[in-house]
Amino acid sequence: MRQILRPGQLFALLTVAGVWQIVCLPEQARGVMGYAGALAIQVLLLIPAMLLIGQGRPFEDVIERKKPIGWTMIGYCILWGARTLTQLRTAVPTRMQTVPGRGTTAVLLLVTVLYTATIGIRAAGRSAPPVLAVALVSAIVLTVGAWRRADLDALTLRVDVPAAAAYVAGTGEAALLWPLAGRTGRGAVRAGMAYLAVRCLLCVGMTVLCLTAGGRLTQGAYPFFTLAALSQPLQGQRADALFILVFMMLAVMQLTLFAGTAAHLARVMHPRLRGTAAAALAGMLLLTLLPADVIETAATSLLPAAAGLLPAATLAAAASRRRAVA
Amino acid sequence: MKETDHLPPALEDVLAGVRQLAHNSADLTIGRVTVGDIPCALLTCEGMVSQTAAAELLIAPLTAMPSCPDAAALFTSIRTRHMMALDRPTAYTYADLFGLVHAGFAVLCAEGAGEALGFGLQGYERRGVTEPMGEASLLGGHEGLTESVRTNMAMLRRRMKTPRLTYELRRMGTLSRTDVCLCWLTDRADPALVRRVREQIAAAQPETVLTPGYVMPFLEAHGGGLFDTVGYTERPDVLAARLLEGRIAVLIDGMPQALTVPRLFVESFQSIDDHSFKPWYATFLRWMKYAAFLIALLLPALYVAVSMHHPELLERTLLLLLTAAEADEPLSLPLEGLGVLVMYEIVREAGLRLPKVVGGAVSIVAGIIIGDAAVASGLVSTPMLTMTAIAVTAGFIVPDLAPAIAVLRIAFLLAGGLWGLTGIALLGLAVLFRLCATEGMGYPLTAPVTPFHLRGMRDVATRVGFLRMQHGGFNVREYREGGAR
């Protein structure tokens, strides 16, 4: 089977999805030290998946024999896609002034995602580095604009447990490390580690900015959007419209990641299936009919199972099989 | 009588068959002559054979030949003792015979032979070697490819005097039977790629091949969409450089362009002069071209989007200036932009298709109308016209991408006008995905940027010094991902 993603693309794709989650964080942390613990928990959670990747056991091989695992992961992707849509529903109308109306924005976004997800997860992987570059440039612009207001005395190093927990709970894309790693082995492990580190650094960076430049202003909901409103790097009256570009790109990438992965896994199990991306997107839309807190609870509850327990169980099953053979 | 029939021994039967199959075509000339006491006929196609060469190299020696007992002895004598032409193929069927006659060979038929002997004495009118129209160079050679495939092969050979440069001549087109030449360097090109190109060309059976567009679809990726996956060049030096990087070229008789596969998107930003200038200047030019591409694509759309939907992004004085300029315009900004862009495309097309003398006049009249009258009458605002003019001028820097830019620029303009930066972002991402998904023969169009190849970046992000470039041994094969999507 042809390799879907290179390690660099895997890193970029997961990091872009991670940036989206950081942008959509509903609360600002009161201190930056909690993220160190969050990073440690994430690494622990992903150790079984990394072991499997390092051993050269692709997810595709497993689901060809055990389809329920594949369908579970597809369900997970659809659930997290639905969570992304609810995040959009809650974040966009209140915090961003997009030009088209709410309905038009949603339709445009879904049409774009349908197109990008249909093209395939490989194209998403190749598109991720340029999008990540745009996101990083925007982060620099944001920092330059906000830094003028920064007051370093406001920086606190204490541990904010709820914020760290929310950070870990938002790492939905991490569970896709194993399904997307293919046979890249150690390269994918390194990509996974780099993704976790960069994601954490970016989150720490934004928290530092919020604490020092935003102060009390960013303590309300969705600190990124408040920070974007505060950061005015250009000589214009307001520059936050620039971040619409990045926000929309990240949203499309995030949804494409989940819809594209679901479609890819479905085709691995049933190569003759057609319209898998559209079906995955339709599934996400259907799920958004549920209350947002139900989706949130279900998605965050499934995260440890998909990211940690599933690979751990696969490892254990393989070990017991080896013992039985011996 | 069929073209696939073998030539009969009797000369009169051969000639009757030829006349019947050619429907007594006016350009077929049959010259009866006795050679070595054997009745013969010399078949040529009018205007295809060099009269001087035929008279001096063929007719004079033939008429002076000693007596031969039969046609077989005559042909043996000609083959072994006389060097009337370098290329002397034998025709066994009417199809072979017509193939030779229509390719400019003089074909000798003899009584009792059952075969015919061809002499390569082509002498049709052809255009000389001139400077290429679309790829001018300041510091490089000024020779461009011509319409003759054999001239082009010779021009390339002059630049690559190595047996590793291989040519493979084929015929394409069921009616035109056009000469198509595949060329590659045996130690550089991927054998799988060579095999695949050969198969694609063999499988392609158009009726005729009149422009490169008749061949390109057979070499292109499925669903390539807006972006070409087959490169082309008019310059033999560029062609040599591409072969050195492991690409395969297709030369087509009648066309002064060579097609090359695989094509990379970054090729559109490279020129032969990049390797003549100092690296720092070449790098500067390279980045200027990237910026020009983005300006050509996005500037009108960004102007419209920001002016209409996000004016808070503008500096106060600039905003007031634009407001004053647009205040009295009867049309909305997107319509204004659309009008100017469509008008530009019409003028460009008119200038291209009309005779050169009239074409220049069209450009002047259109320039005055658009540049002066439209603004003076208040139909188009000066800022909109300025933005469009900058975008159009920037597009000239990357002519390879002109078709994609022309269409996408209008699409972005409409997206920006209707949905502001949101529309531009979403359309931009869709285009990026399509670009990244495009592969030609298993080679991603966007390599070496994504998928990322560090070694490839030295001629993309920068242009390193030639001494370092020489030691790189770069081959496009490194980018191959293979297989179907």
Image (cartoon, coloured by chain):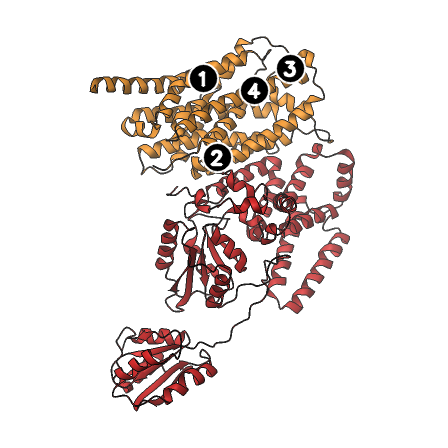
Chain colours: A orange, B red
Q: Label 4: how many residues lie within 10 Å, few (<14), some (14-19) or many (20+)?
A: many
The amino acid on which the numbered mark 1 sits, given as a three-letter code, is Val
Is residue A121 among what the camera can see?
A: yes
SS class, disc 3: helix
Specify the label residue B447 is tagged with: none
Please, is residue B233 above or below residue A180 in the view? below
What whole-number distance in Å separates the C-alpha atoms at marks 1 and 2? 30 Å
Same chain check for tags 1 and 2: yes
What whole-number distance in Å separates the C-alpha atoms at marks 4 and 2? 26 Å
Specify the label residue A113 is tagged with: 2
Identify the mark nearer the N-term, 1 or 4. 1
What whole-number distance in Å separates the C-alpha atoms at marks 3 and 4? 12 Å
Residues marked 1 and 3 touching at CB (< 8 Å):
no
**Residue on which disc 1 sits:** A43
**Residue on which disc 4 sits:** A203
Q: Residue, x 55% and y 41% (percent of image)?
A: B458
Residues marked 3 and 4 touching at CB (< 8 Å):
no
Same chain check for tags 3 and 4: yes
Identify the mark nearer the N-term, 1 or 3. 1
Identify the mark nearer the N-term, 1 or 2. 1
The amino acid on which the numbered mark 3 sits, given as a three-letter code, is Leu
**Residue on which disc 3 sits:** A211
Q: Where residue A232 sits: x, y (%)?
A: 70, 27
Residues marked 1 and 4 touching at CB (< 8 Å):
no
